[in-house]
Amino acid sequence: MTSINPGRQAPWRRLALTCIAALLPLGAALADDGKIKIGFMLPYTGTYAGLGNAITNGFKLYVDEQGGKLAGRAVEYAVVDDESDPAKATENANKLAKRDKVDVMIGTVHSGVAMAMAKVARDTNTLMIDPNAGADEVTGAMCAPNVFRTSFSNWQTGYAMGLYVAKKHKTVVTLTWKYAAGQQMVEGFKEAFEKGGGKVLKDMTLPFPNAEFQPYLTEIAALKPEATYVFFAGAGAAKFVKDYAAAGLKASIPLYAPGFLTDGTLDAMGGAGEGLLTALHYADNLTGAKDKAFRTKYAVTYKMQPDVYAVQGYDAAQLLGAGLAAVKGDLSRRAEMVKAMEGARIDSPRGSFSLSQAHNPLQDFYLRRAEGRDNKLVETIVKGLADPARGCKM
Ligand code: BEZ
């Protein structure tokens, strides 16, 4: 293989390369046309496709508000559909980091995919902002200076719901897809629910993204818990809620979940979700000026209402913008940029938040009630909830 490292060439070759470089147009000589290259690694097909699209919309909305530039530099996008498939995740992340040589990777939705992506980010020292996947490891044992999150940890969402359910019920059955997100949201839930005196009668799982729920509904009916706690999201969540209601369980065994169950899915449930109580760091009727402006612009731009995924995408762009502004768009000043991102206070539609030492949002969690097309704020369950960041050595 021919090396083109001028420092290792014979003097005559070094001179020739220098002359060629001098003849190249400025942009080509720098191998940089001045644009910030952003790689989206998100699901655009499968049960989480709607989530990937909402994150993309939210991110682009913020960039468009800045005139299509961040810190004065135009933005260009590279896009990979990760299909929420962990088996393809390393290859997909390498496409962005090594083939496209993006400046920053934005992704993803699925916790299993996010862990593989975070490993590639570490190995290639590529900046990564996670706009949804909650894998505890990403801001826990795998935490790294170049990996940030604008969403939540799985533990946070489960823990918040457990705090509330413990005040209302003594027994539950849990059901989720069997992968990191569901399992960690169940663990977080149990930590708070059992501390509050509750008892879990049975934990049940089914493979992701299986949506054949009937045998599990039959078992819940037989076990007769006071309540059911689940994690589902996207298209699978809509199907689950419809099946739960059709099985006649909704009236007799109250259903609780992190708010992914009903965010962006209420329309598809055709009324079956009405009245469901969920916990999340966003609701559809917050009163802050930032949220009002965000919702109006989002609705005008995309002809639909935003959800939590759109908010997290918007905030990923805000966080990147804050880092870039601090270094005037000069990505080679990585340490200064990271410091600025670590210290940023993000004026989010959810309410302003800062990041923990492990780069995970410290944020309020709300109890919401599904009413029509909205998840309406009922009360704040917990303020400024911090993820324990177990295993993070930063
Ligand atoms: C996850 O896999 O981390 C996840 C997916 C959808 C919604 C929330 C979390």
Image (cartoon, rainbow, N blue to C red):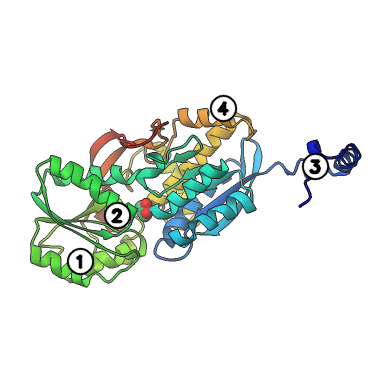
User: Secondary structure beneath disc 4?
Assistant: helix
258 relative position to 27: left or right = left
Q: Tell me the kind of residue under disc 3.
A: Ala
User: SS of the residue at dot 3?
Assistant: helix
Labels 3 and 4 touching (C-beta < 8 A): no
The answer to whether 47 appears left or right of 211 in the picture is right
Q: Which residue is mark 2?
A: 182
For this view, does 334 lie left or right of residue 243? right
Instruction: Determine if the C-beta at disc 2 is less than 8 A from ligand 1.
Output: yes
Give the CA distance from mark 2 to mark 3: 49 Å
Q: How many marks?
A: 4
- Give the mark nearer the N terminus: 2 vs 3: 3
In this rendering, the answer to whether 105 lies above or below 228 is above
Do the numbered discs 1 and 2 sit on residues whose CB atoms are within 8 Å? no
Nearest the camera: 280 or 199?
Answer: 199
Q: Quadrant of residue 188?
A: top left
Find disc 3 in the rendering and name its residue.
Answer: 29
Mark 1 to mark 2 CA distance (whole Å): 18 Å
Q: Circle 1 sits on which residue?
A: 244
The quadrant of the picture occupied by the C terminus is: top left
Q: Find the distance from the CA under tag 2 to the CA under tag 4.
A: 36 Å
**Which mark, residue 336?**
4
Q: Disc 1 marks which amino acid?
A: Tyr
